[in-house]
Amino acid sequence: MSPHDYVDSLCPKTCKGSSRRSLLSVPLEERIKKLIVEEPVARRFGDLKKYVAPDHTTEELLDVLQKHAQLLLSSGLWVPKTLLLYPNKDDKGLDINHIANKDHKDRQTARNYVLNLFRKNPVIRNSHLDLQEGIKIHVYDSLRILAFSRPSTQDWKFKEQPDMSFMELYPDIVKTQEQNWERMEEKLRIAVKSNTDCYLKSASMTTTPGKSLNSGKGTAEGASEVHTGGRTMSDETRAALQEAIKEVFQDHKVCNFQLIRRGLSDLAVGTSTLPKVDPRSKKVTAAQYGVQAPQLELQRSLKHMMLCTFTGDLTYWMMLFCACSLVNAKLKRSEVSEATKISLGKEFTANKFSKVINEFCVSSGSSWVLKKGHGGI
């Protein structure tokens, strides 16, 4: 076995498809494009530099990657840009007729949708995959390349281990990539027909101060209303919003208001194509409302959700205690112990305290403080 063949056998993810020898014989940009198109998996920058660009500087490799790839911020790994895999122009440089080839556009949208979810979290819940059929089939095609299904937890887990060292070494690149993702996300919302702003604009056109969003049909019997600057929310919508907020907390144990709004927005995108008769469609409406709801109204729903969920489990009590009472305070075990006795009439075990405190707080000397709640990105 030759030295080149031996290296190929040691790094199949970097060399599969085109051998390392043939890759190194072409210019850097061409070799990177060829590699990531033939096998569009997630790749570490260090592996690419070592095996694919050993004869080029770090800056040269970064320039090529930013041109043809995207950085997944939740893992620090690079994936090929969707337009490289599904270009808008053919080999002759002519525009592809998307009207006649809707499947091509659906493939682009589906892959960008998957990448956008993975750039935030290495796990995608199945509930985020309720899309229209034209896009849904291609979503699973992209998922199978980057992740593996976990039926027991009803989600998809990113295949590769993260490379957070890249995020620390190149903060300027990370910032630029984040800005690129934000611009793409806005276009993606339109592509999957879940533009929150359009929904809210439509709702406001049919709503007058002091009336419900459903004023044309009347308010359901027994439903109370919460007035927020001329806008109202029925008990039904509020209950659906609380359920939507619970889903956000499944991904992030501690959230600030910005992260809650972003989570609600992602939920609205993930379930926006559900039929109106589907009971879950109410959650979409509530999530869309919550994205733009005044902070006071969102805070009321948040506290009400915690109180309704609380059943004596220390986990929920700690969530309420931290989020509503000690946002800016330092937390000591003795204080939690005393508060638990007063609230629950019992003490917690050491294991229970350790589990809960590590979910919601970070150590600060001899005390604990609530996590920042910005999602870590």
Image: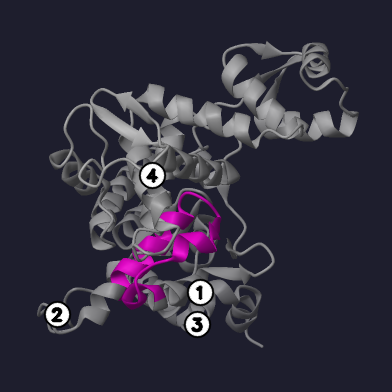
- Spatial CA span between label 3 and label 4: 52 Å
Q: What is the span of residues highlighted in magenta in the rendered image?
A: 107-136
Q: Nearer the viewer, residue 253 or 14?
A: 253
The residue singled out by tag 4 in the image is 286
- Locate residue 349 relative to residue 354 in the image: left or right: right
Label 3 vs label 4, nearer the camera:
4
Q: Tell me what residue is drawn at x 59 percent, y 45 percent.
A: 250
Label 4 vs label 1, nearer the camera:
4
For label 4, the crowd category at 10 Å Cα-Cα, with few meaning under 14, some 14 to 19 and many 20 or more, is many
Q: Residue furthest left?
A: 94
The residue singled out by tag 1 in the image is 145
Whether the residues at callouts 4 and 2 have beta carbons within 8 Å, the answer is no
Q: Is residue 109 magenta?
A: yes
Label 3 vs label 2, nearer the camera:
2
The residue singled out by tag 2 in the image is 96
Q: Earlier in the sequence, mark 3 or mark 2?
A: 3
Q: Earlier in the sequence, mark 4 or mark 1?
A: 1
Q: Which secondary structure lies at badge 3?
A: loop
Q: Amino acid at mark 3?
A: Ser
How many tags in the picture?
4
Q: Which secondary structure lies at badge 1?
A: helix
Q: Amino acid at mark 2?
A: Ile
